[in-house]
Amino acid sequence: MAIEENLDNVQQRIRTACTACGRDPEEIVLVAVSKTKPNADILEARKASQLHFGENRAKELQDKMEEIEDDEIRWHFIGNLQTNKIKYMVERVDWIDSIHKKKALKEVEKRASRIGRHINVLIQVNISDEDQKSGCDPDDLEKILTYGQDLTYTHVRGLMGMATFTDDKEQVRNEFKLLKTLRDEHLHLVDGSVTLEHLSMGMTNDLEEAIEEGSTMVRVGTAIFGERNYT
Ligand SMILES: *Cc1c(COP(=O)(O)O)cnc(C)c1O
């Protein structure tokens, strides 16, 4: 499979989307979502200079990291995070993109401070109309961000959101707009460990809309590694 070519295509899509709205492509971090895919695929993407990789299952991430052992890779955990897995993540990943509770933030800080390791986190917000999509309620953001200000090892770098799975591009766009608005409305809470410079939104099917609406981080799986057999 032509992963290198796929990566080129995705980068081209990012550049085109940036040009269309007058943004600098350098502002966009591409996270290659390698969930369910073998290490050989990750290594192929790595050879094509891809640095950020995203995984959504703790055990799978653990196995992959142990086998690949590449210090340059920036691993993102993008899945549903159970409290008992936080210790493991904090010891290894660079980013946890899917924090949606103050309690989880507290646990990340506790574990990170014990080992003196800094970790970047994004607060996942539920912007879709699907109940099963995780993320905090927009009304909880203020409480979570305020708590994040005084942390030392945990850096709240921004917000993450997933749009509704639908062909209705207007709806998707409106959900991205909502995430951007939520970020802007909470900029007064930028202080200490809360910086909020990132908006992680946009995947294979909606990265153009996401970039036009202000995304700084896109999480792309299928367009790089091909279809998955399971999610
Ligand atoms: C799987 C996944 C992606 C990538 O989705 P594609 O449509 O394959 O690009 C992005 N974000 C999260 C949180 C995911 O679980």
Image: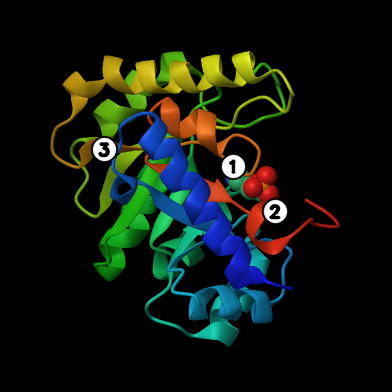
Residue nearest the viewer, comparing 224 with 162: 224
Give the quadrant of the N terminus. Answer: bottom right
Reading the chain from its start, which is encountered first: label 3 or label 1?
3
What percent of the width, then of the height, locates residue 29? 39, 52
- Observer-side mark, 2 or 3, equals 2
| Cα–Cα gap, marks 2 and 1 | 9 Å
Marks 2 & 1, CB-CB < 8 Å contact: yes
What percent of the width, then of the height, locates residue 70? 45, 83
Neighbourhood count class around disc 3 (C-alpha, 10 Å): few under 14, some 14–19, many 20 upward: some
Neighbourhood count class around disc 1 (C-alpha, 10 Å): few under 14, some 14–19, many 20 upward: many
**Mark 1 lies on residue:** 203
For badge 2, the amino acid type reads Thr
Reading the chain from its start, which is encountered first: label 2 or label 1?
1
Mark 1 CB within 8 Å of ligand 1: yes
Label 3 residue SS: strand
Q: Is residue 98 left or right of residue 67?
A: left
Neighbourhood count class around disc 2 (C-alpha, 10 Å): few under 14, some 14–19, many 20 upward: some
Where residue 197 is drawn, which disc sits there? 3
Reading the chain from its start, which is encountered first: label 2 or label 3?
3
**Mark 2 lies on residue:** 222
Mark 2 CB within 8 Å of ligand 1: yes
**Extreme residue toward the left, this view:** 192
Q: Residue at x 61, y 67 (%)?
A: 5
